[in-house]
């Protein structure tokens, strides 16, 4: 898929802190942009259900990810334990980028 | 009993439950672990939760802790690394989880006569070293889980230390378990913020109990020591001054309000459960400071009885305020300094209780009857 933009938000957790970023892939390094694209392809992100919220845990994170391509836009809200294992790497990468972006 | 038979031979759950309640100590532990694994394999989290109460009421002897190591993976509970009575580990996180859950057990048992999370000796399971770079701790409905913060980042980029480092975090997570067995406050909006606040209140009291600090000596910081030196902050939340725990270029500013006029309406964080908890947190702080002495003795008792006997899944701030006020009247008498302190606590955050009277519906018998109820010599009265 030709991803143009990805928005990421993490809320909740014990600390209740909000971490968010809004990334245009053209502005990212080639390495980060290609990694994000690969991870989204691997997840078949456009086909994921919009809500994957698991309410079973206390102090767990909630994630909101919005992906924009030339053809479509899709938002997924997921609880931590409901997120597919394959999504972990993407969440970690976006979390790291969110912190880095905020520092700049 | 052959050790492998439970795991590999698919003993029917009803038999496992019998073993879990009637077997020897080692049989009980093995049966519980097998039930948990098999329920997880079948994806039956709800089914597991349904029989949790009955199944885990097995350690009637008292404090029973088991610490597991997830070895930076995500499989729960992980490998057993320390059990009740074992000597110290070389792993500091293991010892912190063990000692912290022990102090939490002691506070609830010694002060509130509550035998573990469920009131009936439930085993306290904790997993450390959960995932890599996991800056969080949580209660999953069955056990405590702790990450190591930003251990995977270079030292100059780390924001969080390991989550077992703060004793009040451990008390906080275990209190989620207590709430799960008592008021069952839903985890959203005001009931969710009360759920969070109860965990902060008793998490802080666990730390104060360990340090034998009075209300005026305590720092009332939640998560002191969790933030690294790279962060401009003293902890995650402040019960004394909500909204002032941190103000940092990366983490932003502590968003907690201390008053109803600043209540935050949001869909994030399950309706701001970690944000608006600042309001009832501050009410408790003001009440405790007003009373002086050890906060776990009077203020803690009032809040504990309220959580146990007065609140329900949908309780909101005003109801909690009224119920703590009523409980103070029942425990210490209508118009007592304790009841007045509760009134001042809630007034400080913009909530009015007991206006123009000695308190809503104080029960006859007052202190004596309440004490009898506490020790089980009189029937418990839900409201």
Image: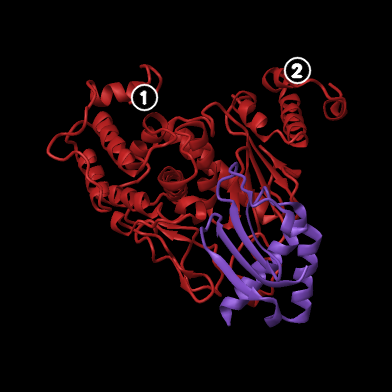
Chain colours: A purple, B red
Identified at 38% across, 55% down, the residue is: B278
Q: Which mark is residue B59?
A: none
Q: Which mark is residue B382?
A: 1
* Of pointers 1 and 2, the one earlier in the residue sequence: 2
Q: How far apart, in angstroms, are the residues tagged by discs 1 and 2?
A: 35 Å
Q: As drawn, is B308 to the left or to the right of B33?
A: left
**Residue A96, image x, y percentages:** 66, 70
**Residue B373, image x, y percentages:** 36, 22
Element class at badge 1: loop
- Furthest-left residue in view? B356
Q: Residues within 10 Å of mark 2 (few under 14, many from 20)?
A: few
- Pointer 2 chain: B
Identified at 56% across, 47% down, the residue is: B100
Q: Quadrant of residue B142?
A: top right
Element class at badge 2: helix
Q: As drawn, is B347 to the left or to the right of B31?
A: left
Identified at 25% across, 52% down, the residue is: B350
* Residue B273 visible: no
- Furthest-front residue in view? A71
- Pointer 1 chain: B
**Residue B290, image x, y percentages:** 25, 49
Foreground of the two, B356 or B18: B356
Q: Quadrant of the N terminus of chain A?
A: bottom right
Total numbered circles: 2
Q: As drawn, is A98 to the left or to the right of A26?
A: left
Q: Are marks 1 and 2 in contact (CB under 8 Å)?
A: no
> Does mark 2 fall on the same chain as mark 1?
yes
Q: Which residue is mark 2?
A: B15
């Amino acid at each position: 898929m030709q991803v143009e933009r990805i928005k990421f938000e993490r809320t909740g957790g014990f600390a209740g802190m909000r971490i968010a970023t809004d990334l245009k892939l053209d502005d990212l390094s080639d390495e980060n942009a290609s990694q994000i694209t690969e991870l989204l392809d691997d997840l078949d992100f456009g086909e994921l259900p919009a809500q994957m919220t698991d309410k079973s845990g206390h102090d767990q994170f909630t994630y909101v990810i919005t992906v924009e391509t030339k053809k479509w836009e899709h938002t997924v809200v997921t609880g931590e334990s409901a997120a597919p294992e394959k999504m972990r790497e993407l969440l970690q990468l976006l979390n790291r980028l969110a912190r880095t972006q905020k520092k700049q | 009993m052959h050790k492998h038979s439970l795991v590999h031979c698919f003993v029917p759950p009803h038999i496992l439950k019998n073993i879990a309640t009637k077997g020897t100590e080692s049989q009980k532990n093995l049966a519980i672990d097998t039930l948990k694994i098999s329920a997880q394999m079948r994806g039956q989290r709800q089914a597991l939760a349904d029989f949790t109460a009955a199944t885990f009421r097995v350690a009637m002897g008292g404090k029973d802790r088991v610490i597991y190591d997830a070895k930076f993976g995500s499989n729960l509970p992980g490998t057993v690394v320390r059990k009740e009575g074992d000597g110290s580990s070389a792993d500091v996180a293991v010892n912190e989880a063990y000692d912290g859950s022990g102090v939490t057990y002691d506070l609830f048992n010694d002060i509130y006569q509550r035998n573990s999370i469920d009131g009936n000796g439930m085993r306290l399971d904790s997993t450390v070293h959960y995932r890599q770079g996991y800056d969080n701790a949580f209660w999953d409905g069955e056990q405590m889980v702790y990450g190591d913060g930003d251990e995977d980042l270079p030292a100059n980029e780390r924001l969080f230390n390991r989550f077992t480092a703060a004793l009040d975090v451990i008390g906080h997570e275990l209190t989620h378990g207590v709430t799960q067995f008592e008021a069952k406050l839903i985890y959203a909006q005001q009931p969710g913020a009360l759920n969070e606040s109860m965990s902060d209140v008793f998490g802080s009291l666990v730390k104060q109990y360990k340090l034998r600090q009075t209300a005026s000596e305590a720092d009332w910081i939640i998560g002191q020591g969790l933030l690294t030196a790279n962060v401009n902050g003293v902890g995650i939340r402040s019960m004394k001054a909500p909204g002032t725990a941190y103000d940092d270029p990366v983490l932003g500013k502590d968003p907690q309000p201390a008053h109803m006029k600043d209540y935050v309406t949001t869909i994030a964080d399950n309706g701001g459960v970690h944000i608006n908890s600042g309001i009832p947190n501050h009410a408790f702080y003001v009440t405790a400071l007003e009373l002086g002495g050890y906060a776990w003795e009077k203020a803690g008792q009032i809040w504990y009885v309220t959580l146990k006997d007065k609140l329900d899944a949908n309780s909101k701030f005003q109801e909690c305020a009224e119920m703590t006020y009523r409980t103070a009247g029942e425990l210490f008498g209508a118009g007592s300094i304790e009841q007045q302190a509760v009134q001042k606590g809630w007034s400080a955050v913009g909530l009015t209780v007991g206006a123009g009277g000695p308190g809503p519906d104080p029960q006859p018998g007052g202190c004596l009857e309440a004490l009898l109820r506490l020790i089980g010599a009189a029937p418990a009265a839900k409201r």
